[in-house]
Image: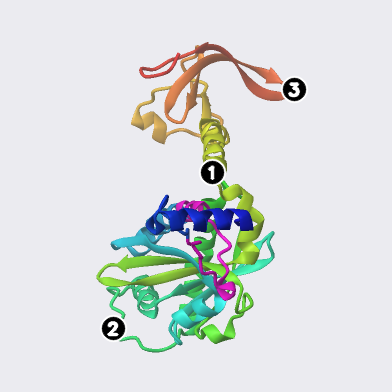
Amino acid sequence: MLSQQEIDALLSALNSGEIQASDVTVKEEKVKLYDFKRAMRYSKEQLRSITRIHENFTRLLTSYLSAQLRTFVQIQIDLVDQVNYQEFIASIPSRTILNVFQVNPMDGKMIMEMNPQVAYAILERLLGGQGDSSSRNGTLTEIETVLMQKIFSRASDMYQSAWKNIENIHVRWETIESNPQFIQISSPNDTVIVIALHVTIGEITGRMTLCLPHLIVEPVLPKLSTHQWLSSMSRSSVPQQDKIKQNLDTIGVPVIAELGRATLPISELFNLQIGDVIGIETGKIEVKVGQVTRFLGNPGLQKGHYAIQIDQTIHSEGDDI
């Protein structure tokens, strides 16, 4: 803002020719349009973190469906964006497959929308077909609904695993709907995150879409920064070897103590009677782990039970001594 004295001085300089009118420029303020009906609640950095989480999910889901369907499966992220819930509902077909999941501890619901052709291709493969869904044009039967529930209940476990570096959530499959108008997980103007996935199953291609309402995402927003993501990844990678070792420590293996051996002719073996005594070659007792002799020891008693006292450990080639 110029004072009256400054304005008079500027006009005087223009009249005397000290400055030219072209030298005087007016800076225009840049105005950014903002639509309050479509509030952008998430930054680009937060959306990138959401993308990374769902890249992990697509890898897990691809491996699972490939094993279940015994065919080529590829799932890739096409789009991650934020829209209002009304726009999401308007963007999906009126007849589709909608899996609804309950998400705790946020106490909210999320949607996985699936193109019917993709859903029918999955069902065809599960029921022994070739995955051709072109002949299908109807709703799911009760048996098909149970099969879809089985597949996507397992998918919900994978979704939990994809989020574990950010937040421990519990996802439970709830129901299947075919009409999006029957599902109301958020108010029409609330912002939701939409993750569009491109799915290929054999020769069939289609789209799956995840819808995350703000109620689910809001509690974890502070953890979606790049710094938080990298620190959580580093914390989870450090104890990975310890976790593997801990899981291996609980695996049961058969341990057998072999008291001795005896060799008998077939004729004597067939003539054995109750009360006969077989002489065995005595010595150190061999203790086998699986089919491999790993220890030598002597027989004894421990608290009223037969026991073996280990005297020697036998190392085989390749052991880390």
Local packing at callout 3 (Cα closer than 10 Å; few below 14, some 14-19, many 20+) is few
Judging from the image, what secondary structure is the residue with disc 2 in? loop
Disc 2 residue type? Ser
What residue is drawn where x is 48% and y is 25%? 288
Disc 3 residue type? Lys
Q: How many marks?
A: 3
The alpha-carbon separation of the residues under discs 3 and 1 comes to 54 Å
The alpha-carbon separation of the residues under discs 3 and 2 comes to 71 Å
Q: On the image, numbered disc 2 is attached to which residue?
A: 134
The alpha-carbon separation of the residues under discs 1 and 2 comes to 43 Å
Q: Nearer the viewer, residue 4 or 217?
A: 4
Going from N to C along the chain, the mark reached first, 3 or 1, is 1
The quarter of the rendered structure image containing the C terminus is top left
What residue is drawn where x is 60% and y is 56%? 2
Q: Is residue 163 magenta?
A: no
Q: Quadrant of residue 201?
A: bottom left
Local packing at callout 1 (Cα closer than 10 Å; few below 14, some 14-19, many 20+) is some
The quarter of the rendered structure image containing the N terminus is bottom right
Q: Nearer the viewer, residue 258 or 80?
A: 80
